[in-house]
Amino acid sequence: MRSVAVKVAQWIDRLGSIWVEGQITQINLRPGTRTAFLVLRDTSADMSLSVTCDPGLIRSSPIPLHEGSRVVVFGKLSFYTGRGTLSLRALEIRPVGVGELLARIERLKALLAAEGLFDTRLKRPVPFLPSTVGLITGRASAAERDVCTVAENRWPAVRFKIHNTAVQGPTAVAQIVRAIADLDADPDVDVVVLARGGGSVEDLLPFSDEALCRAIVAATTPIVSAIGHEPDSPLCDLVADVRAATPTDAAKRLVPDAAAESAGVRELRERSAAALRGWVQRETHALNQLRSRPVLADPLRELGHRHDEVARLRASAQRCVEQFVRTEAIATRHLREKLTAVGPAATMARGYAVVQRVNGTERQVVRSIEDAPTGSQLRVRVADGALDAAVLGAKALGRSKRPATDKTDDTDAGRN
């Protein structure tokens, strides 16, 4: 038994490396272990093969590997004599079929994202009511029928320019790119719709082509992508200006609903009329309040109040002025009486006189007998007039002499 097992192991070890395609039915990847275990099953026959590999091969796969994934494994067969089992030591694992397509699409998606083609700032706005819609779809397809029917039901005046192209297969990309260029060059087309019904990953592969994605970005006309159904997400959905879940959704996004818009207009008109009526009522109420105020109800009332106040102020001012005048008149009279009492006229009225010596045109008040020698001409001023006299003689009274002055002021008083 042992010899047979050893010889079988030696014979298998001499075999070279091989490629094996199959479907993963079991994955055993435990944390901390250096070996991962897989089971490959032949989809066309009830046969399976054990596979061992480094855990890094599974973790570094371009697409996640799980049970049910189809892969191609490159490795070398080995026979374990202890258990008598045959296994394949995998050196490389590649996804095939849908997995390979998805991996290729993911690599292209990363490239386009790095170039910024998915940036929302590059998205062009779709016009609110396009006059002409360019439609790229398959001939007599359900997508064409859905877009046209829904759009015409929503807005009967909408017009279409339809380009029927292949939507799957090797010629689809070239025809779709040419149709986009033709519609983009047409000045009557306001928006372009790229529509297709649902399908498998292989059927939708043309809509993830790099050339088509770059043509959509280069177009100046807004492009709406309506490919497949909601779960489908080809790359053209990411580079298009608007992504619609279905062709029917694209038609709803393109044109407004005429009935809904009419209802909206009616509602806005009613709201505007109500708002205008409310504004008029508020302003009318405000005007009535202003008119009911006393100052506007009887504008002359304040003038009458002010007239009475002005009259009172004038009477008060007049009384103040009259009182001031009376007070000043009394003060003036008192001052005049004081001046009269101490003035020369009052002094002369009491028997005094002013004696002046006349020397030609000059007059000098006589203050001493020495100022008027014998023979001098005198002018004697009394209370009721003046007398002309002459000095006949002089007699001293024995009192001290007063110094003479040269003043000729008629107001100086002296005793005769």
Image (cartoon, grey):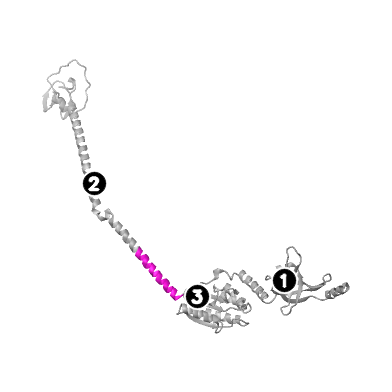
Would you name the residue on which mark 3 appears? 252
Q: How far apart are marks 3 and 1 (CA)?
A: 46 Å
Would you name the residue on which mark 1 appears? 26
Q: Which of marks 2 and 1 is nearer the N terminus?
A: 1
Relative to 298, 161 lies left or right = right
Q: Is mark 1 on a helix, strand or loop?
A: strand
Q: Distance between the residues labelled 2 and 1?
A: 110 Å
Would you name the residue on which mark 2 appears? 309
45, above or below 123, in the image: below
Badge nearest the viewer, 2 or 3:
3
Q: Which of marks 2 and 3 is nearer the N terminus?
A: 3
In the image, residue 269 lies in the stretch drawn in magenta: yes
Q: Which span is picked out in magenta?
A: 257-278
Relative to 98, 306 lies left or right = left
Amino acid type of the residue that numbered disc 1 sits on in the rendered structure: Gln
Residue projecting furthest to the top: 398
Q: Position of residue 54 (x, y in %)?
A: 75, 68
Q: Earlier in the sequence, mark 3 or mark 1?
A: 1
Q: Can residue 237 be seen in this view?
A: yes
Q: Position of residue 176 (x, y in %)?
A: 58, 80
Badge nearest the viewer, 2 or 1:
1
Q: Where is residue 204 in the image (x, y as percent from the top left)?
A: 61, 78
Q: What element carries label 2?
A: helix
Relative to 192, 333 lies left or right = left
In the image, residue 263 lies in the stretch drawn in magenta: yes
Q: Distance between the residues labelled 2 and 3?
A: 78 Å
